[in-house]
Image: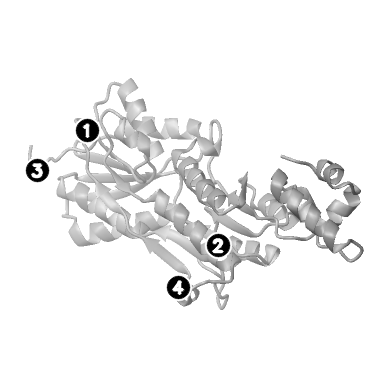
Amino acid sequence: MATIKEIANLAGVSTTTVSNVIHGKTGKVSPATIEKIKDLIKATGYVQKLGLRVLNKESSRLIALVINHHKDFKNSILADPFYARTLGRIQEQVQKLGYYLMVYTEKDVEKIFQMVAGWDIDGVIAISFSKRNCEKIFRLTGKPVVAIDAYGELDEGQEQQVMNISLDEESGGYMMTQYLLECGYETIKVCAGRDNGVDHLRLVGCRKAMEDHASRRQKLQFEALGMNAEKRMESYRWLLQRNTPKTALFFLSDLYALEAISFFNEEGVLVPQQIGVTGYDNISFSQLSVPRLTTVNQDVDKKAQMAVELLMEQIMGEQSEAATVNRDILLPVTLIVRNSARNWIEC
């Protein structure tokens, strides 16, 4: 890959002249020299450095992917299969379109605001933010923003500008709870770090299913596991101490469900014979556990692809009329039945 200095040497001109041609400042450069430099740029495969493009207020072709994670990760947030797969698909799509992806993850949302405000970016994909904070990113950058799994409500009278791609979370909670009730479980404990964000929506679906399908003997409880590994281990031990026959644990994250299965195995408790365990997300690891995990499937690839497509439409000024009307897009979920929960009715 050639440098400006190498192109200048080949053209027999100064580096300043080459730089002026690259940036369109050709008032004092002859047409023949302009043509010669342009031909050399094409022939040598010169690619302008992003830093120069930013300094000169050109399109940076830089997309920011920001993730506001809410729980503590033992290693990195990108070790979570959901985030890793989402990142991989977004990067793949962005690269195909000739853009560059900058990734920034942080629990402190104020640091994310500072980051997006300080960079010259063409657009933002925001994952796991409240809708209010997505709108703030839009105001800070003045650039197109697309959200994945934004939650919560806007302030009264505030118009939603940021498009949000999320799941039909309530349906996911509903269908898993209905399935466990139909299997004959008498106690369903819905387990999540806390009752917040998308987990709250999933819990709402669980409660609706109970209203529609539960008998008098069947009950549902919410169990807050805590937001770090140490608290979760304490919660798993507490759940075992209070385990009763025909109890199912519905974890609102596959990672937590798989972590719990491992913990139970070490304690000599059999899944699903002694306790049922189900999850949510259908990450790749859910098919590798023993037993394999019954879960709710979401199409991560579709989420990522749609986020990039919608963002690019806005960057290019080609947003469809339907997109301007519907700012919230709900993707369907499906129930994946494996063998981490048993059917008590057939026993």
Numbered tag placed on residue 312 in the rendering: 2
Judge whether 108 appears above or below 75 on screen: below
Q: Position of residue 183 (x, y in %)?
A: 15, 45
- In the picture of the structure, the residue carrying the numbered disc 3 is 345
> CA separation, marks 2 and 3?
51 Å
Residue 206 visible in the shown view? no
Q: Tell me the amino acid under the disc marked 3.
A: Ile
> CA separation, marks 2 and 1?
46 Å
> CA separation, marks 3 and 4?
43 Å
> CA separation, marks 4 and 1?
42 Å
Direction from residue 61 to residue 7 in the image, left or right: right
Q: Where on the picture, by quarter, is residue 313?
A: bottom right
Disc 1: CA contacts within 10 A as few (<14), some (14-19) or many (>=20): some
| Label total for image | 4
Which badge, 3 or 1, is on the more N-terminal residue? 1
Direction from residue 284 to residue 163 in the image, left or right: right
> CA separation, marks 3 and 1?
14 Å
Of badges 2 and 3, the one in the foreground is 2
| Residue plotted at (44% across, 75% down) | 322
Disc 2: CA contacts within 10 A as few (<14), some (14-19) or many (>=20): many
Q: Position of residue 240 (x, y in %)?
A: 31, 31
Disc 2 secondary structure class = helix
- In the picture of the structure, the residue carrying the numbered disc 1 is 272
Disc 4 secondary structure class = loop
Q: Tell me the amino acid under the disc marked 2.
A: Met
Numbered tag placed on residue 326 in the rendering: 4
> CA separation, marks 4 and 2?
17 Å
In the rendered structure, are the residues bearing label 4 and label 1 in contact, judged by CB atoms less than 8 Å apart? no
Which badge, 2 or 1, is on the more N-terminal residue? 1
Judge whether 278 appears above or below 335 on screen: above
